[in-house]
Amino acid sequence: MKTKFKSQSLQDKIFIIVVYSLLIMLFVIVAYPLIYIVSASFSDPQAVISGEVILWPVKPTLRGYAAVFKNSKIVTGFINSIFYMVAGTSLNIVMTILCAYPLSRKEFTARSKLAAIFVFTMYFSGGLVPSYILVNKLGLINTPWAMIIPSAMSTYNMIICRTYIQNSIPDELYEAGQLDGCTPWKYLIRVVVPLSKPIIAVLVLYYGVAKWNNYFDAMIYLKKDALQPLTIVMREILIQNKVDFTMISDVKVASELQGLTQLLKYSTIVVASVPVLLIYPFVQKHFVKGVMIGAVKG
C-alpha cells in the first residue's frame, strides 16, 4: 500500500489525503455519539449528570442495565419487538418472493400491468383513516397481527427482488427444470430460493430493521400495554419523561432519581440496538452482492 502511494503523482496523493481526512472526520462525527451513549450507560449516574463522561465510562457500574431488566414494561416491549421482527420479517420474505418470482417470468403476459399496479401503490395510498378502518374491520386492532399483516410486503423491496431474479438466474435453468419434470413450485423452492440467498439476506436486513424500529403502527393500532413494542416504551422514557421532579421535596433523592433516569435512557438505547447489530454480521457478506448484482445488467 505504501509503495503504491509513493508511486502516485502529487495531485493523486493530495486527493487521497483529503479523501481519507474527510472520511476520518465523518467517522468521528458518527462514531462519537454512539461511543458516548455506550460509555454513559456504564457510568455512574452522577457522573453522567455532571458531564464527566466524555469518552470512557466514569466509575463503571451496571445499575443502568439492572434497572432496564427490572422494568417489566421494557422486558415485555423487548419480547414483543423480537416477535414482531421475526414473524413480520418471515412473512415479508415469503410474500416478497411469491410476488417477485411471477413478475420476473417472461411467459407471464400480465406481469407489466400488475407491476404497474404495484408501483402505483408506492406513490398513492388511501391514507391513514382508510387504513385504520380497514385494519379495524379485519379485527386486528389490539392484536399482534396489526403489526405484521398490514405491512406484509414492501413494493420497493419486491422490485429489488424481481430485478435480482431476472438478472441473476438464467432462463436456461427453468427450461432444464421443465425437461426434468420440475413444476413451477419445485423450481421456485429448489432453484430460485437457493440462488437468491444474497438478495434474501439483504431483504432480511431491510425488513428486520424496519420492523424493529416501527412505532407508528403501534401508536395507531395497539392500546394495550402488554402488546406495545420496545420503541413505544423507549418513546415514553426518552421523550415523554413521566418522572415529575417537582413533586419530590428531597433534593438528594431528586438528584439520584434524575441520574437513574438518565442512566436508564442510555442503557435502554444500547439494549434496543443490540438485535440489529447482531443481524448485520450474518448478512454483511451478502449485502454488497445482493444490492449491486441486480442493479447492473450485463
Image (cartoon, rainbow, N blue to C red):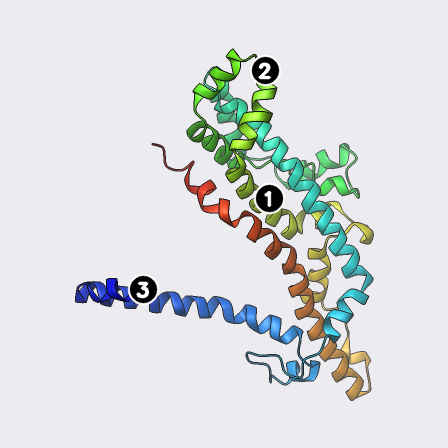
> In the rendered view, does 167 fall on the left or right side of 31?
left
Q: Quadrant of the N terminus?
A: bottom left
How far apart are the two marked residues, 2 and 3, measured between alpha carbons? Answer: 53 Å
**Residue 11's quadrant in the figure?**
bottom left
- Secondary element at image label 1: helix
Q: Which residue matches tag 3?
A: 19
Residue 268, above or below 161: below
Q: Residue at x 57, y 46 (%)?
A: 205
Q: Nearer the viewer, residue 153 or 275?
A: 275
Q: Which residue matches tag 1?
A: 207
Q: Residue at x 81, y 79 (%)?
A: 247
Total labels drawn: 3
Amino acid type assigned to the residue bearing label 3 in the image: Val
Q: Earlier in the sequence, mark 2 or mark 3?
A: 3
- Label 3 CA crowd tier, 10 Å (few <14, some 14–19, many 20+): few
Q: Nearer the viewer, residue 234 or 117?
A: 234
**Residue 78's quadrant in the figure?**
bottom right
- Label 2 CA crowd tier, 10 Å (few <14, some 14–19, many 20+): few
Amino acid type assigned to the residue bearing label 1 in the image: Tyr
How far apart are the two marked residues, 3 and 1, measured between alpha carbons? Answer: 33 Å
Pair 2/1: label in front: 2
Q: Nearer the viewer, residue 142 or 160?
A: 160
Q: Which residue matches tag 2?
A: 183
Q: Residue at x 40, y 38 (%)?
A: 295
> In the rendered view, does 251 fall on the left or right side of 99?
right
| Horizontal and vertical percent position of residue 117 | 52, 26
Q: Earlier in the sequence, mark 3 or mark 1?
A: 3
- Secondary element at image label 3: helix
